[in-house]
């Protein structure tokens, strides 16, 4: 969702700035723009559409050497995606440029006030009020002008401001939307996330809410809203630049699915002891809160929410804890009952999802203890939670969550066992589960080698308009995740139901044009699942079943089958994940779509 990049300092090629912007493409956008200073004037270029169109329209201009520039990918909120509404937004003088991620809630009032004071607006964006506010406050000091301007803003923002009269500096400010700053060789850098910074540095500073920074080459000064200097340490990021490249794969999504064995291996590293116990050194401080917890609540969105459902089924099975799981956008507006005996598990790959962050803030205000399960070191969620478990999946560029989902599951299985042990005793079933978990990377390697076979099935089913995913028990989150993956990248209407619910309504939809994708491992609910599959067969629906290798009973009731190896029944959601992901991937690719950039979606959902 909206990507911001800025670079200032020694001369650099304008195309380096655009290269950086391209690395933010994955966040999702519908227009793009850049502003830079040349001979004391601000130059502005914007397009509706992709960054490649911006590149084409700029041609040779990209070879210019500049000292300061900001660029942006916009995911439209206020005003349709077009050139005028694209960022950067300027002021009445045409000397000042602002890029913004977030939503200014009081922009209407501010706009009225600014109009009454004679400002002329050209766009429909909320961002333009920031440009005019900075303009009003600018005399000598750009930092002071930005500081004065942001004090009038309600809502969320990460902004970068450039002024033609101040070609040696950029000023940035943050409240509620992510912003990272860092130093390259003679260059100061800023971006919405660390991916474009990796070509220059791995030591970055995550700004906190209410912080403003002035970047002059490699000199970065940070202040609070009162103007006090803030000293912050840079955080070392362990990611490699090649992690964020396609490395020969057709799509990031495919590459990231293929990276799952490694992602899982990293998630497991140092977390299982030689005598088969779970350790989380990062949870030491919250261990007493875990031991005394009477209630567990999970808050998350999308795929992370599905991981939370697996956690619920698993933890409730082995402990006497009740686990409530809610999507963050509901949780934050519910009358939730949280107190000091409530443990809240916030799951978020990016650590920047606005709804999840608000849910966490609400839970903390009410006295709960928050444990984050997150993939991005230094992200807002990690800074606001009482403790963080890092998933260690490595950067995920494809909009569809894939390797981060399996890493989440691994970490959550471990967390559930850790919590159960802290609450009571070590369950003997855990020995076997841990043993099998430790061997999951090899199981994944075997599963991923079946990509071609899954592709063949995808070919057969690619032209259906609807899919019904069904499952029971631990198969329900897999069904939900399978349907989400398919719909978000192939635009097929895929819906998920608890298999037992079919007969209460959805079965009316089924006929020979409405395939059922049944999650049917050999677990305690297999026979019940089989009955639901037969009910669907009786309505003429084509059946694809995902089950346990060699299951003849399943074979008999299905038109097509996909297999995973036999494993402890609790781990089926984990081993089934690559299969549902590959199926969705191939359908999308066969339909000629780009699974890395699904329409209307953003990787990091930083607005409500
Ligand atoms: O970064 P988060 O895990 O908080 O993101 C939550 C959802 O937006 C995300 O899981 C989304 O559903 C996936 N990209 C779908 O593949």
Image: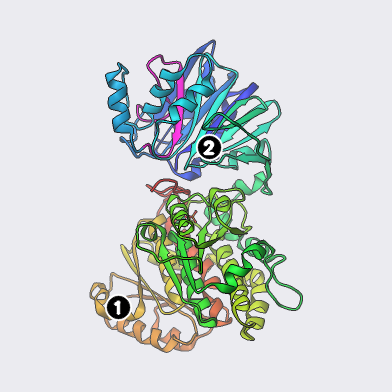
| Residue under the image location 31 percent in, 76 percent down | 541
| Residue under the image location 56 percent in, 64 percent down | 408
**467 or 378: nearer the viewer:** 378
Would residue 549 be visible to someone looking at this image? no
264 in relation to 45, above or below: below
Assign a secondary structure to mark 1: helix
Q: Which mark is residue 502?
A: 1
Q: Would you say 216 lies left or right of 401 here?
A: right
In magenta stretch: residue 414: no
Residue 576, position in %: x, y? 52, 72
Q: Earlier in the sequence, mark 2 or mark 1?
A: 2
**Residue 530 found in image quarter:** bottom left
Residue 326, position in %: x, y? 41, 65
**Magenta residues, dominant SS class:** loop
Query: What is the crowding at mark 1: few (fewer than 14 residues within 10 Å), some, or many (at least 20)?
Result: some
Residue with the mark numbered 2: 22
Q: Please identify the quadrant where the N terminus is shown.
A: top left
Residue 303, position in %: x, y? 46, 61
- The range drawn in magenta is 84-104
Assign a secondary structure to mark 2: helix
């Amino acid at each position: 969702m909206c990507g911001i990049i800025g670079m200032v300092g020694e001369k650099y090629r304008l195309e380096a700035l655009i290269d950086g912007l391209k690395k933010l493409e994955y966040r999702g956008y519908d227009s793009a723009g850049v502003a830079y200073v040349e001979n004391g004037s601000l130059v502005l270029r914007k397009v509706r559409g992709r960054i490649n169109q911006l590149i084409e329209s700029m041609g040779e201009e990209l070879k210019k050497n500049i000292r300061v520039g900001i660029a942006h990918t916009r995911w439209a909120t206020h005003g349709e995606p077009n050139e005028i509404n694209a960022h950067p937004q300027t002021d009445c003088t045409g000397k000042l440029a602002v890029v913004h991620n977030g939503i200014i809630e009081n922009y209407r009032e501010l706009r009225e006030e600014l109009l009454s004071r004679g400002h002329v607006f050209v766009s429909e964006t909320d961002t333009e009020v920031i440009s005019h506010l900075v303009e009003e406050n600018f005399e000598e000091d750009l930092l002071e002008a930005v500081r004065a301007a942001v004090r009038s803003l309600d809502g969320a923002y990460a902004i970068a401001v450039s002024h033609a009269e101040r070609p040696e500096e950029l000023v940035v400010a943050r409240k509620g939307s992510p912003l990272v700053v860092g130093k390259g060789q003679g260059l100061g850098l800023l971006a919405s996330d660390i991916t474009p910074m990796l070509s220059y540095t791995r030591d970055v500073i995550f700004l906190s809410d209410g912080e403003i920074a002035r970047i002059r080459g490699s000199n970065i000064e940070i202040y609070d809203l009162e103007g006090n200097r803030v000293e912050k340490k840079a955080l070392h990021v362990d990611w490699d630049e090649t992690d964020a490249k396609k490395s020969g794969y057709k799509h990031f999504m495919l590459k990231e699915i293929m990276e799952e064995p490694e992602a899982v291996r990293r998630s497991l590293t140092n977390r299982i002891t030689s005598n088969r116990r779970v350790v989380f050194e990062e949870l030491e401080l919250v261990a007493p809160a875990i031991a005394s917890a009477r209630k567990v609540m999970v808050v998350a969105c999308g795929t992370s929410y599905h991981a939370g459902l697996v956690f619920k089924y698993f933890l409730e099975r082995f402990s006497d804890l009740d686990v409530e799981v809610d999507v963050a956008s509901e949780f934050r507006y519910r009358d939730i009952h949280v107190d000091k005996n409530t443990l809240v598990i916030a799951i978020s790959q990016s650590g920047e999802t606005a709804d999840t962050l608000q849910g966490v803030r609400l839970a903390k205000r009410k006295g709960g203890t928050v444990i984050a399960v997150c993939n991005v070191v230094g992200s807002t969620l990690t800074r606001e939670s009482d403790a963080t478990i890092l998933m260690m999946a490595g950067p995920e560029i494809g909009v569809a969550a894939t390797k981060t989902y399996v890493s989440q599951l691994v970490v959550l299985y471990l967390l559930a066992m850790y919590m159960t042990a802290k609450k009571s005793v070590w369950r003997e079933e855990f020995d076997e589960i841990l043993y099998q978990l430790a061997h999951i990377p090899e199981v994944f390697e075997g599963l991923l080698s079946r990509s071609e076979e899954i592709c063949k099935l995808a070919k057969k089913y690619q032209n259906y308009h609807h899919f019904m995913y069904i499952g029971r028990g631990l198969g329900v989150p897999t069904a939900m995740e399978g349907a989400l993956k398919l719909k978000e990248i192939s635009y097929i209407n895929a819906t998920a139901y608890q298999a037992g619910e079919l007969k209460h309504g959805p079965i009316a939809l089924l006929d020979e044009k409405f395939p059922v994708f049944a999650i049917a491992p050999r677990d305690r609910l297999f026979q019940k699942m089989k009955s639901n599959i037969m009910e669907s067969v009786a309505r003429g629906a084509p059946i694809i079943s995902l089950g346990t290798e060699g299951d003849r009973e399943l074979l008999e009731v299905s038109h097509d089958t996909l297999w995973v190896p036999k494993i402890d029944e609790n781990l089926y959601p984990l081993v089934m994940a690559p299969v549902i992901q590959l199926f969705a991937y191939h359908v999308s690719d066969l339909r000629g779509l780009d699974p890395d950039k699904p329409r209307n979606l953003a990787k990091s959902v930083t607005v409500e």
